Amino acid sequence: MAFSRVYSDPLSRGIFKKFVVMLCSLLTSLYLLHCLTDRCSSMPTPVKASSQVVGFFSSELHDLRSLRRKRLLQKWTTGSKPGLSYESADDAKRTSEYSRFDDADTGQVLYEPGHQVDSDSEKNRELSHYMPPSLGDIVYSKRLARRFMVKTGSTGKVSPLGDGTKKLPQAMIIGVKKGGTRALLEFLRVHPDIRAVGAEPHFFDRNYENGLEWYRELMPKTLEGQITMEKTPSYFVTREAPARISAMSRNTKLIVVVRDPVTRAISDYTQTLSKKPDIPTFESLTFKNRTTGLIDTSWSAIQIGIYAKHLDNWLQYFPMGQILFVSGERLISDPAGELGRVQDFLGLKRIITDKHFYFNQTKGFPCLKKAEGSSKPHCLGKTKGRTHPNIHPEVVQRLRDFYRPFNMKFYQMTGQIFGWDD
């Protein structure tokens, strides 16, 4: 009765209505705040280094976020389409460590990137079951996928860059200097089943005392079915190299790019001249005695071109079937054909074909339409295609006469006619 009297009073009824509205508004606000707080806690929030939280909860939160992103990235890419490629060059600069190497073939200083990826702990894997994915994480993982995934072989599957292990090379480009080894390596790196060190390790001629584990650490990570490669052209003329490589693995496949020894010697001299303009003339270095025409075989530019002599040393440790000789001339005139032979030799599917190349008229040799990890055309650097100095025709002919018997023996040993004496 009392309640009905209060409720029947107009003033009391108005106050009661306002109270109910305020109570509903308050409950609604609290509910929205609860939802927003729960939502924000599941979003991937970057933490600045300058504002780190010290203590147990800081490290646990970082671990959970890091783990959640890795797991979502792996789940998202399980059903991905093939075609994702290597991370961009800008990303590589930000995420890689670099080691310095000198490339003896080009005379350039090269830097080889190495990626670091943390592994998940057992504790994190257990905690991850209680961390459902949020929309923010899914968007974040899609953004990362194009940067941190690589195609794993001809199957087109993708895998995080951190996967795989560092292995000793199963194949090597061992020579020859100024024969076209840099071009061959760059062409081969287009193949998804080949991972190669960009710089020349010079392990078996200069750094052998550092040990095989040091050498292994220089190699890129490879997945199952991929081949690890390196190139150091000076191995072919290093007397100790065959025995050392055989001691590492007698199954190593060896690739030698050979070129007309006369042209190769002039190219070798041209490279040295670009670094040391005050060196003697080509003619004076070629002959011990210009009058008698006696060739100075102690000069490295001449000595490298005696291919038969160096091959004798290698055949003491490796059968001819494990050595492939690539024509430097045909690598220019028919790059796809020579690359086909190399892919067959390595037991790989012929993926590198004519469609990967175009001929650069300015440089005078083929270039890649799309280099490894890039969507842009790529030609070798300024150190390639230098203009050779004019050499007197008589000197060139003397050199051809000198090399002819060695070339003939080399043709016989390899079963290939390279046509340098035509």
Image (cartoon, rainbow, N blue to C red):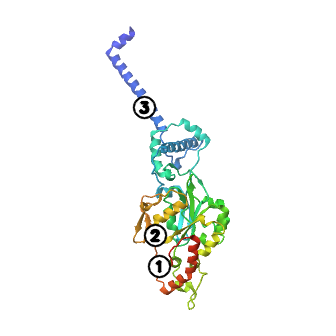
The answer to whether any part of residue 149 appears in the image is no
Q: CA distance from mark 1 to mark 2?
A: 17 Å
**Which image quarter: residue 226?**
bottom right
Label 1–label 2 contact, CB within 8 A: no
Label 1–label 3 contact, CB within 8 A: no
Q: Earlier in the sequence, mark 3 or mark 2?
A: 3
Q: Which residue is mark 1?
A: 388
The answer to whether any part of residue 21 appears in the image is yes
x and y percentages locating residue 138 in the rendered image: 46, 42
Q: Secondary structure at mark 1?
A: loop
Graded by Cα atoms within 10 Å as few (under 14), some (14 to 19) or many (20 or more), the crowding at tag 1 reads some
Q: CA distance from mark 1 to mark 3?
A: 77 Å
Graded by Cα atoms within 10 Å as few (under 14), some (14 to 19) or many (20 or more), the crowding at tag 2 reads some
Please tell me which residue lies in front, 274 or 7.
274
x and y percentages locating residue 236 in the rendered image: 60, 70
**Amino acid of disc 2:** Ile
**Amino acid of disc 3:** Leu
Residue at 55% in and 86% down: 284
Graded by Cα atoms within 10 Å as few (under 14), some (14 to 19) or many (20 or more), the crowding at tag 3 reads few
Q: CA distance from mark 3 to mark 2?
A: 69 Å
Please tell me which residue lies in front, 311 or 223.
311
Q: Earlier in the sequence, mark 1 or mark 3?
A: 3
Q: Which residue is mark 3?
A: 32
Residue at 47% in and 52% down: 147
Q: Which residue is mark 2?
A: 332
Q: Is residue 396 above or below residue 104?
A: below
x and y percentages locating residue 68 in the rendered image: 52, 42
**Amino acid of disc 1:** His
Residue at 45% in and 41% down: 136
Please tell me which residue lies in front, 302 or 7.
302
